[in-house]
Amino acid sequence: MTPLILALLAGGVAGVSLGALGAGGSILTVPALIYLLGFTPAAATTASLVVVVVTSVTALVAHARAGAVRGRAGLLFAAAGLLHAAGAGALSARLPAAVLTLLFAAVAALAGLHMLRRSAPGGSGTVSGVRAAGAGAGLGAVTGFLGVGGGFLAVPALLTVLAVPMSAAVGTSLLVVAANGLVALAGRAYAAVHLDLALLLPFLAAAVLGAWDGRRLAAKVSAGTLRRVFGALLLAVAVAMGATAVL
């Protein structure tokens, strides 16, 4: 199978995950870029941010048209993590490749385990400014270091910390992901990382189309089924990345 076909297939899967669940897309993007398309870990996490921003905005439009985005809550949550996203993005390029890979494997495992949970957490009904700031800062740092949108962290945080209803949590998480991803990408602007645009652009195009399909898929397939499928996939990815980093 040619690298171009691999880029199209992997991009499509990542986009579907992001559009359907508001999470998982970027966590699939990084290993796909490394192991299928030959990117270095530093280049893959940077390229992933490009994919995260564009696909998140694409999926966000669809959710906004359906009235499933809480703009004020999303912007406040994102604001708490912007400085952390920028700082972590600037520092990420200095991490050794093996360390970056192991950290990413740990986050992928956490995301997979979260998706395999049978039910999503419910809203608390109360809003804590301190908890919201802490959760937003943590999400921003994860986005900056590892090039992941962090939707798997944003969705439960929006539900439990900001009391966003489940019907709007995925759409609102996309707003948070897009904002953090853009700032983290800006933090890497001066890093000497080569991005193979001949492979990245087809990957990105397929991810954008997949994000639209993911939104439609979410309306036809139960959220629990989607979470279990992508959760199992993320756990397999985490094990594979951890093994390659230590061997």
Image (spheres, grey):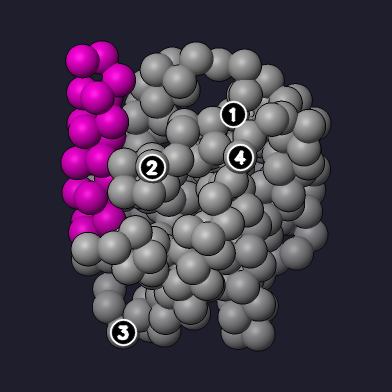
- Spatial separation of the CA atoms under disc 1 and disc 2: 20 Å
Q: Earlier in the sequence, mark 2 or mark 4?
A: 2
Amino acid on which the number 4 mark rests in the picture: His
Judge the density around disc 2: few (<14), some (14-19), many (≥20) Cα neighbours within 10 Å.
Answer: some
Q: Position of residue 78 (x, y in %)?
A: 73, 46
**Residue 220 got which mark?**
3
Q: Which residue is mark 1?
A: 145
Q: Looking at the picture, which amino acid does disc 3 mark?
A: Lys
Residues rendered magenta in the picture: 227-247
User: Mark 2 and mark 4: span between their CA atoms?
Assistant: 12 Å
> What element does badge 4 sit on?
loop
Residue, disc 2: 38
Camera sees residue 119: yes
Q: The C terminus is located in which quarter?
A: top left
Q: Residues within 10 Å of mark 4 (few under 14, many from 20)?
A: few
Q: Which residue is mark 4?
A: 194
Assign a secondary structure to mark 3.
Answer: loop
At which x and y percent is residue 102? 37, 21
Mark 4 or mark 1: name the one nearer the start of the chain.
Answer: 1
